[in-house]
Each structure stands twice: as structure tokens, then as C-alpha cells.
Image: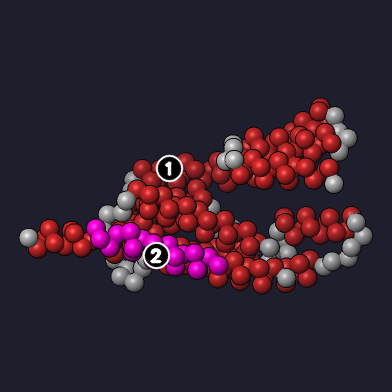
Amino acid sequence: MIKLIGILIVAIGFGFRLNTLLVVMLAGIVTGLVSGFSFNDVLTQFGQIFIDNRYMSLPIILTLPVIGILERYGLKERAESFIKKAKAATAGRVMLSYLIIREFSAALGLNIGGHAQTVRPLVAPMAEGAAAAKHGELPEDLKEDIKAHAAASENVGWFFGEDIFIATGAILLMKGFYDSVGIDVSVWDMALWGIPTAISALLLSWWRFSLLDKRIQKATTSGKINHSKKTTA
């Protein structure tokens, strides 16, 4: 059981909001040491995994400059102004729509989103724009709350959606573990039982987004009334 200490380190590190990369590296090093590897062997494994998966970083390296250029020329502003024209849109509905698309596409093995590619330049500004169109200028704490929920919509949609796709890394990792301990579980069974979890995550997120909309309305109602009175005067 001591070999599972890496999980405890990750949980504690994330709980104290420490640097994510350093926490994960520390967890990997400690897990390797308690498993009988030398420090040099652990570093060798880090290097080998990086070399074997170096092409995985290419989409990020190629995407970030493109997103930066688009933001430079008003991508966020255009997304925000576009969503303001949709009268029925709210911050919660915008993020719920993205979560549904993200989860469904991930279940089909399609990676069409991401924090840098989609959430920061599109989803978060559109959610803020939808809220601002209904309630006027938002206080800074509500803007940060919306950004946090937008990031959560990406994490939840991708994490739970990909577990329905049989060729995803998480499914294959679990399959390899079960095979190593002599348990025969089909990847189709694991993907099938990922569906109830994905649906539960979707419903729970819908509830959280509804609470966010109510919180925004409650926090901004008095401000809108005061603004109306000043305009009338």
C-alpha cells in the first residue's frame, strides 16, 4: 500500500494549491523510490516518457500562437458581443451547452476543446457577455466565478466523456491494470459503465450552473434597480 503514497501527495498538494507540476513530479519521484527504484532510475523514466510522448506537445505549441493572434485581434470581444444578441442566453446555459458538446464529442473520441483553445478565448467571454447583457456590468468576484465554472465545464466534459470511448488512455490504463492482477474486464464493459457516471456529472453540472445564474441575479439585482432609478431621474 505504501506504493500508493503518490496519490496522497497529489491530494495534499492540490488541497494546499501548490504548484501542480512540482506536486506531480514529487509524487512520481516518491512513488518510484518507495517502489525500489533508484533516484537515477526515476529520472531516467521521466526522460524516457518525455521522449516517447514529445509529439503530444505539438498541438499545444502550434495552437497557442494562433489563439494569441486571434485574441490580439478581438476574438474574445467578438464572442462576447455575439452572445449578447441571444436574449435567452445566460452564463449557466452557455457553459452547460459547451459541456454537453464537449462530453458528447469526447465520448466519440474527438478532442475539439481545451482551456487554451476554447475556454479562455470563447466560452468564458461568452458566459460573461451573456450575464452582462442581462444584468449589466458584473463585479469582479462574479467574473472570476464565471471563469472558474467555465474551466470546470471543460474539465468535467472531457474527463467523464472520454471514459466512454474505448480507445482513450484512461480506459486502456485500467484495462492494463486489471490484466496485470488477473481480472478479466472488457474495455466495452468499462466504457458502458462510464455512461451513468457521465450522465450524473452532466446533471450535477446543470444544477451548479443554475445556482450560478441565481447567484448572479441575486448579486446584481439591486445594482440594476439603482441604475434604472438614476436613468429615470
Report, in whole angstroms, how far the alpha carbon at label 2 lies from the one at label 1: 30 Å
For the point 46% across and 45% down, which residue is it? 66
Look at the image and give the residue range highlighted in magenta.
Answer: 204-223
Q: Which label belongs to residue 180?
A: none
Report if residue 12 is visible in the image: yes
Residue labelled with disc 1: 68
Whether residue 45 is visible, yes or no, is no
Give, as a three-letter code, the residue at label 1: Gly
| Badge count | 2
Residue 37 within the magenta-colored segment of the rendering: no
User: Does the magenta stretch mainly form a helix, a strand or a loop?
Assistant: helix
- Whether the magenta-drawn stretch holds residue 207 is answered as yes
At a point 47% along the width and 56% down the height, the residue shown is 150
Question: Which residue lies under the disc numbered 2?
Answer: 213
161 w.r.t. 9: above or below = below
Q: Position of residue 222 (x, y in %)?
A: 25, 61
Contact? badges 2 and 1 (CB < 8 Å): no
**Amino acid type of the residue tagged 2 in the rendering:** Asp
Q: Say if 227 sits above or below 22 in the image.
A: below
Foreground residue, 31 or 87?
A: 31
Q: Residues within 10 Å of mark 2 (few under 14, many from 20)?
A: some
Identify the residue at image location x=72%, y=72%: 192
Q: Horizontal and vertical percent for residue 226?
A: 18, 59
Q: Nearer the viewer, residue 206 or 162?
A: 206
